[in-house]
Amino acid sequence: MRIIAKETLEQYGKRHVQALQPLRAWYELVKKETWATPEDIKRSFPSVSFVGGDRLVFHIKGNAFRLVARVRYKKPSTRNGIVHIIRVMTHAEYDKVDVTTLRYEG
């Protein structure tokens, strides 16, 4: 998969050091994937939550952090699918927002 906004992971990891290594591990795993269906994602991440449309929530570091992303699945005519990282937050921060309306903040 092609991952957009890797810098979001790095910046968050600098502010929350305990999240940095798990976020990097997530990135390394996802970039090797070729998800064409939601079932492909569930095989890779059984705890992922599908929260509407193309939006997903990945549980990071035993669910201490949440990574909200948008996925464009791989199609037969494309080389890769795309994962666009929208936001990383603590579980407590996640509980205070509607993830279906979050926008990438850069």
Image (tube, rainbow, N blue to C red):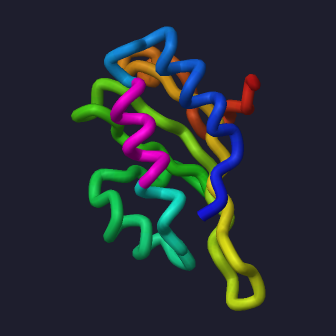
Front in this rendered view, residue 101 or 58: 58
**Residue 87 screen position, x and y as percent:** 59, 30
**Magenta stretch containing residue 22, yes or no?**
yes
Q: Is residue 60 left or right of residue 5?
A: left
**Magenta stretch containing residue 18, yes or no?**
no
Q: Residue at x 53, y 74 (%)?
A: 34
Locate the C terminus by quadrant: top right
Residue placed furthest toward the left: 62
Q: Residue at x 66, y 69 (%)?
A: 81
- Predominant SS of the magenta segment: helix
Q: How many marks?
A: 0
**Residue 29 screen position, x and y as percent:** 41, 56
Q: Residue at x 53, y 59 (%)?
A: 31
- Give the magenta-colored segment's residue range: 20-28
Q: Residue at x 51, y 50 (%)?
A: 56
Q: For residue 102, which quarter of the picture?
A: top right
Q: Is residue 59 left or right of residue 35?
A: left
Q: For residue 64, which quarter of the picture?
A: top left
**Residue 28 screen position, x and y as percent:** 45, 51
Front in this rendered view, residue 18 or 91: 18
Q: Is residue 45 left or right of residue 106?
A: left
